[in-house]
Amino acid sequence: LSYAEGLFDSEGAKGNRNVIEGKSMAGRRDSIISNGKNNQEYTSLTYRTYRYLEVGVETADEPLVINDIYGTFTGYPFQMKANLVSDREELSDMMDIGWRTARLCAVDTYMDCPYYERLQYVGDTRIQHFVSFYNSGDDRLIKNAINLIDYSRQPNGHTLSRYPDRQNQVIPTYSLWYIAMLYDYMMYGSDTDFIKEKLMGSRQVLNYFITFLDEDGSLKNVPGWNYTDWVPEWNFGMAPMAEDGSSAALDLQMLTALQYGIALEEELGKTEFVQLYTSMADQLVETIKRKYWVESKQLFADTPAKDTYSQHVNSLAILTDIVEEDTKKAIGKSLLEDESLAPTSIYFSYYLHLALNDAGYGDQYLDWLDVWRRNMELGLTTWGETSQVETTRSDCHAWGSSPNIEFFRILLGIESASPNFKTVRIAPNLGDIKKIGGAMPHPAGMISVDYKKAGKKLEATITLPKGVDGEFVWNGQVNALKAGENKLNL
């Protein structure tokens, strides 16, 4: 029995996953030797992942009769509670594919993929846990992930890149994104004490990185695989780095972690840590501007040499809020139009899309989904690992399921505005959509929205759970929302 996500052509590419002719099977297999008796049964010792199953039989003197062969779906029992109501079939198809991908990448932990490593990587998990928040509201696997990554902390303070794991792989940037996961849970989860218990670990992670800060506050020569994203031009996914160890991508990821650390300490921790992290963050902001900003291009460079540029660095510059609104707008324009920038993959596009929305381009969100459309054109029923869809290794990577988040966060505009989702901010980006609605889970119930546009008018109906209020933002105007049903004509 041979199992494969896709079949391979003579050059080793998968191409269109629906095409079988002229392709061959390669991958995991089980070899079974019959003892010649009737009614034998075989079940693999662990679950197998496949879209294609090849059964090869070699008999000797007696024929073999196969009475039945079947598969049983295996995965964490997530339940889809969110819904998106639209006349655009493409959105529904993307939701289904993203949800299928997320379910297949979750069993007793989140994992990067069901076919290959089956490991819970921090970078992947941050996106996966938002799919859980926005689609199911089930936080049990989220809390399990945070616990396990916390358990992975090493004697010097940093977490491992993935856990459970026997190889102790270190991706420093993933240790920084773990701080972001703690912040996310504080904002969207309901168990305050759970995150408060993790603050000592958060401090130890940041303390580890603080030991690698140069005099100017910049990160230098952090040991490990400093992975940022799969960019073909980069060395094994590592963002460009100067000979002295300077890297805008690493500095901005460090700044992001410091900012999340500040927010965690302000809400749940101690003022001493707020003051410490704030002083370091302030210094790092000035250093980033001085070392990497190129005025003539209105962009941040990858290194002090200022000879290469990426969507990654400039997305993080927007998200860390180190430039004014008009500069964000200019950077966003370059992110959309400048093809010389190293491009984000299907994974890091999560951050690119958030940055573009922050820069004021959210109405264009549906124009940014070409990689996902390419997956669908090539017959994938789950999202591939990289943007090189024809040749991507894994055909099922849940870090690509960000549309299942952004249909609700960017398109419908729903996001948490305070810890424990006690207040909500709703700022839709409808583009040319005339009618759309949906609902998503909240710790206190469900949030539902319904939008109808006619000319320059918007009719919005927003229903919030009991005890939850917030604001609705449209064309720069802020409207108060109360618990229960809110009808707005704007």
Image (cartoon, grey):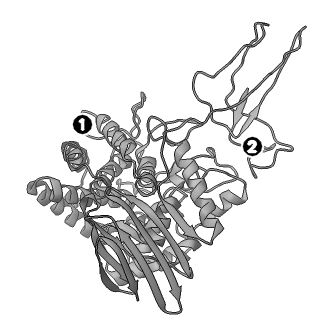
For this view, does 445 lie left or right of residue 370? left
- Say few, some or many: other residues with alpha carbon within 10 Å of mark 1 (under 14 / 14 to 19 / 20 or more): few
- Vertically, is 245 above or below 287? above
Residue of label 1: 156
- Say few, some or many: other residues with alpha carbon within 10 Å of mark 2 (under 14 / 14 to 19 / 20 or more): few
Q: Is residue 308 visible?
A: no
Marks 1 & 2, CB-CB < 8 Å contact: no
- Vertically, is 45 above or below 123? above
Find numbered disc 2 in the image and state the secondary structure of the residue it sits on: loop
User: Can you give x and y, in whole percent of width and height, for residue 419 in the image?
Assistant: 24, 60
Q: Is residue 40 visible?
A: yes
User: Can you give x and y, in whole percent of width and height, for residue 155 in the image?
Assistant: 24, 33
Quadrant assignment for the N terminus:
top right
- Vertically, is 254 above or below 54? below
Residue of label 2: 12
Q: Amino acid at mark 2?
A: Gly
Give the residue drawn at x 37%, y 84%: 326
User: Can you give x and y, in whole percent of width and height, for residue 197 in the image?
Assistant: 19, 43
Q: Amino acid at mark 1?
A: Asn
Q: Earlier in the sequence, mark 1 or mark 2?
A: 2
User: Can you give x and y, in whole percent of width and height, for residue 240 in the image?
Assistant: 45, 57
Find numbered disc 1 in the image and state the secondary structure of the residue it sits on: loop
